[in-house]
């Protein structure tokens, strides 16, 4: 009887242990399945962007002793992302459009911003890490004519200049908000209109394009980095860095294009926005032998912000 009782207790205990193990194993599999289900919600197409309108205005009457010039300015901007992701590939697309005008009292209307840029980056998974085999395309130009502020002479217009870059490389992507693409074999073509090069003196250039020509071909290395972060609640900062070195002509002179977009959200439709851009390109010079300089642009304003 004692042996029978002991055997029964032992069998019950073993059954309990096996049941617990099966329960733990089942719970583990359920959690893993849930995790995979959560991950798959990020797959497929994800799109989103913002439309921003900024307005600035200052007015002074003739009796205002401290001095000042009445002015009015407006800027519009579109920043739109259209991204695709699967278990083995990613395809990120970004469109940025910006245009602004400023009017000072007793002066003509001038541009304060003018950009049209499209980026497309495709990556194929390389192993189980955050690395991808990649290919990218970048196109940027402007939409309106630009004029020398001192002489009033037209210096640029739509598609003059325009830049097109394409090349294979390696992409490191942690998330949609943090990624770096390295492309050591990148082709770049600069397009300009012949009206800016037909009368150029020999030995000079227009954005790197020689007299009586309309294109310039370059081959080099490109590094493109993107980082978006939340500084504090309702304040986000977007950083975009593009580097390029031309193997065929002064590879030590690296072209730099850095953009920073800061959005300080007030409510669903209102925000304060700061946009900064710094460019260094030793080919980005006006007609003639003018030494290149760092180009700097800053736009700040309180405006309407729509997400879509």
Image: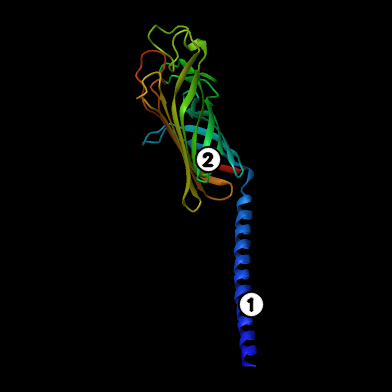
Foreground residue among 177 and 111: 177
Q: Is residue 62 above or below residue 160?
A: below
Residue at 61 percent of width and 78 percent of height:
14
Q: Residues within 10 Å of mark 2 (few under 14, many from 20)?
A: some
Q: Residues within 10 Å of mark 1 (few under 14, many from 20)?
A: few
The image shows residue 248 at horizontal and vertical percentages of 40, 18
Q: Residue furthest bottom?
A: 1
Which residue is labeled 2 in the image? 126
The image shows residue 158 at horizontal and vertical percentages of 55, 20
Q: Is residue 184 above or below residue 273?
A: above
Q: Is residue 251 above or below residue 274?
A: above
Q: Is residue 231 above or below residue 107?
A: below
Foreground residue among 175 and 132: 132
- Which quarter of the picture shows residue 254? top left
The image shows residue 181 at horizontal and vertical percentages of 48, 36
Q: Quadrant of the C terminus?
A: top right
The image shows residue 242 at horizontal and vertical percentages of 45, 32
Which residue is labeled 1 in the image? 15
- Which quarter of the picture shows residue 53? top right
Residue at 43 percent of width and 8 percent of height:
200
Q: Name the secondary structure under disc 1.
A: helix
């Amino acid at each position: 009887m004692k042996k029978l009782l002991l055997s029964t207790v032992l069998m019950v205990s073993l059954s309990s242990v096996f049941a617990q193990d099966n329960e733990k194993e089942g719970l583990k599999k359920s959690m893993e399945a849930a995790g995979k289900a959560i991950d798959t919600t990020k797959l497929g197409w994800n799109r989103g962007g913002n439309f921003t309108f900024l307005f600035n205005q200052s007015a002074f009457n003739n009796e205002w002793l401290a001095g000042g010039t009445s002015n009015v300015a407006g800027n519009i901007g579109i920043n739109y992302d259209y991204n695709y992701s699967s278990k083995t590939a990613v395809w990120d697309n970004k469109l940025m459009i910006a245009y602004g005008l400023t009017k000072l009292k007793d002066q003509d209307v001038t541009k304060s911003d003018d950009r049209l840029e499209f980026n497309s980056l495709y990556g194929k998974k390389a192993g189980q890490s955050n690395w991808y085999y990649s290919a990218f395309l970048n196109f940027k130009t402007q939409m309106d004519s630009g004029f020398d502020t001192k002489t009033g002479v037209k210096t640029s217009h739509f598609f003059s200049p325009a830049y097109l870059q394409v090349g294979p490389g390696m992409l490191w992507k942690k998330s949609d908000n943090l990624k770096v693409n390295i492309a050591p074999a990148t082709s770049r073509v600069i397009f300009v209109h012949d009206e800016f090069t037909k009368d150029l003196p020999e030995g000079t250039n227009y954005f790197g394009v020689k007299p009586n020509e309309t294109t310039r071909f370059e081959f080099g290395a490109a590094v493109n980095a993107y980082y978006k972060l939340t500084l504090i609640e309702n304040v986000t900062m977007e950083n975009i860095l593009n580097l390029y070195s031309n193997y065929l002509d002064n590879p030590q002179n690296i072209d730099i294009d850095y953009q920073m977009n800061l959005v300080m959200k007030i409510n669903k439709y209102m925000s304060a926005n700061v946009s900064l851009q710094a460019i260094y390109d030793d080919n980005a010079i006006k007609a003639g032998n003018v030494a290149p300089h760092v180009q700097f642009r800053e736009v700040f304003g309180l405006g309407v912000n729509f997400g879509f």
